[in-house]
Amino acid sequence: MKQLKQKNLYFWPNFKNWILKDVKGNGKVQEVISNILPTSMNDSQLKEKYGGVFSKEDFIATIDSLIKKQPKGEAKEDGLLNNGYANIFHVELEDSRVVAVGADWNAGDRVWYLRADGLVYAFGWNYGSCFFSPATGSKTLNTMETKEEIVQWAKRDYADHICGFNDGKNRCDCYGKALSDLLDLIKKN
């Protein structure tokens, strides 16, 4: 396997054991569709709404290609999120199990964290995270109604947010930048 050899990667144990172990050849880089989550969702909801599962080999080739375009966590309009939100992929293993893979840029450590979890991710995925699926056979968020719904939940949730990283009583700007980026993205589409 020639992919995922960059120095700016950190692999959590399940990623090493499930994704990188026993790779059978090189996969093909897939064209992807990215879907910003309009609300917090679990993996069953992601599967139902967006579908799309990568083979292990195609996922490795695809994530390698995406990370190489953002080696220092640079913002890229059609790339991975670099704002602390998760980039989510569903990957099929050799035994036909499907697992969720999260790719997150950690600005403090200057590395991409790659982890794998069972599809029953206990806390679900935060809204504003991005689900990637192969372009073939996947659904997209392209309806005006959906975009309007995204704006409504984003404004509501940001207005009600109390940060767990401060004293728990004061508003903060945790979601401010993410909200601004999300609304810009919606306007462009």
Image (spheres, rainbow, N blue to C red):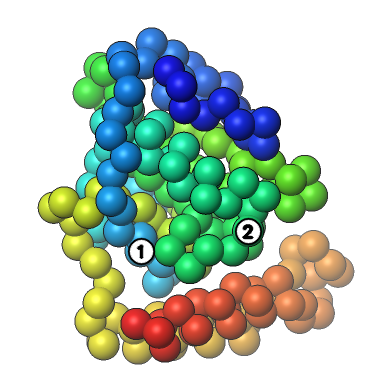
Instruction: Give the camera-side residue of 176 and 8.
Output: 8
Q: Which residue is mark 1?
A: 35
Q: Tell me which residue sits at (30%, 53%) in the image.
A: 32
Q: How many marks?
A: 2
Q: Secondary structure at mark 2?
A: loop
* Displayed quadrant of residue 90: top left
Q: Amino acid at mark 2?
A: Glu
Q: Which residue is mark 2?
A: 74
x and y percentages locating residue 40 in the rendered image: 45, 63
Tag shown at residue 44: none
Considering only order in the chain, which callout, 2 or 1, is on the residue closer to the N terminus? Answer: 1
Q: Is residue 68 above or below residue 73?
A: above
Q: Tell me which residue sits at (23%, 60%) in the image.
A: 49
x and y percentages locating residue 91 in the rendered image: 32, 35
Asked whether residue 128 appears in the rendered view, the answer is: yes
Location of the C terminus by quadrant is: bottom left
Q: Amino acid at mark 1?
A: Asn
Q: Secondary structure at mark 1?
A: strand
Q: Tell me which residue sits at (32%, 40%) in the image.
A: 29
Q: Tell me which residue sits at (30%, 28%) in the image.
A: 27
The furthest residue to the top: 22
